[in-house]
Image: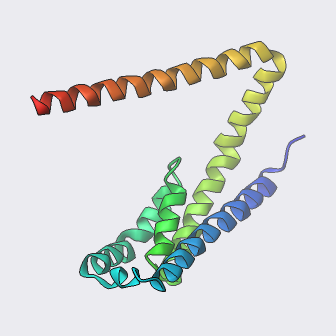
Amino acid sequence: MSLPFGVALAALFAIVMIRVNVTYWIGRGVVAGFAHTRYGTSLERPKAARAQALIQRWGPYAVVLSFLTIGFQTAINLAAGAARMPLRRYLPAAVIGSIIWAVLYATIGLAALDTWLAVAAASPVGAALGIAVLAALLVWIVVIRKRRAAAKSADTVV
């Protein structure tokens, strides 16, 4: 069973818009709560003001671009809320980014999922081996990076 493209696109857009807006409002709520603690005055320091100004200016671009990444989208939308980015700047960026995300997932993402499910149905052992190879590759990349970082830090210490 396959969804028509328009239905898939609309559903994905709605899902991501709900998710990013909830994340944004969680960020705003956390900062509002933090402001009522004894540490709340730290939000009024010059560094905090500069950081907020930076996010207010460049944040909408970061929000849009975050939809092209894996793993940064939530952090950037949370930061936009925490920095109290005005809705007049946040919402257009969130809408544009959500459209991009929905189009990517409705085309490439769902096609990849269909392909993966077809492979898994045809050969569950092959699908399991594919997952094992990807996991091994990821572990290998992480180990190599840690070794290089350790070697680099050892070189700078000596």
Write the residue at 34% across / 80% down.
42
Position above or below: 3 against 49:
above
Instruction: Name the residue rendered at 52%, 65% in the picture.
Output: 77
Residue 20: image x %, image y %? 61, 65
The image quarter containing residue 26 is: bottom right
Which one is in front, 41 or 139? 41
Q: Residue furthest front?
A: 38
Q: Position of residue 158 (x, y in %)?
A: 9, 28
The answer to which quarter of the image holds residue 147 is: top left
Residue 153 at x, y = what percent?
A: 20, 32
The residue sitting at 50% across, 49% down in the picture is: 69
Q: How is the image coloured?
A: rainbow
Q: Relative to 130, is 34 above or below?
A: below
Q: Residue furthest right?
A: 1
For the point 76% across and 13% down, the residue is 125
Tally the numbered discs. 0
Q: Position of residue 36 (x, y in %)?
A: 48, 86
In front of the other: 73 or 153: 153
Above or below residue 86? Residue 98 is: above
Instruction: Tell me the quarter of the image containing the N terminus.
Output: top right
Q: Is residue 124 left or right of residue 64?
A: right
| 53 displayed left or right of 40 | left
**Which quadrant of the structure image shows residue 148?**
top left
Left/right placement of residue 130 relative to residue 40 reads right
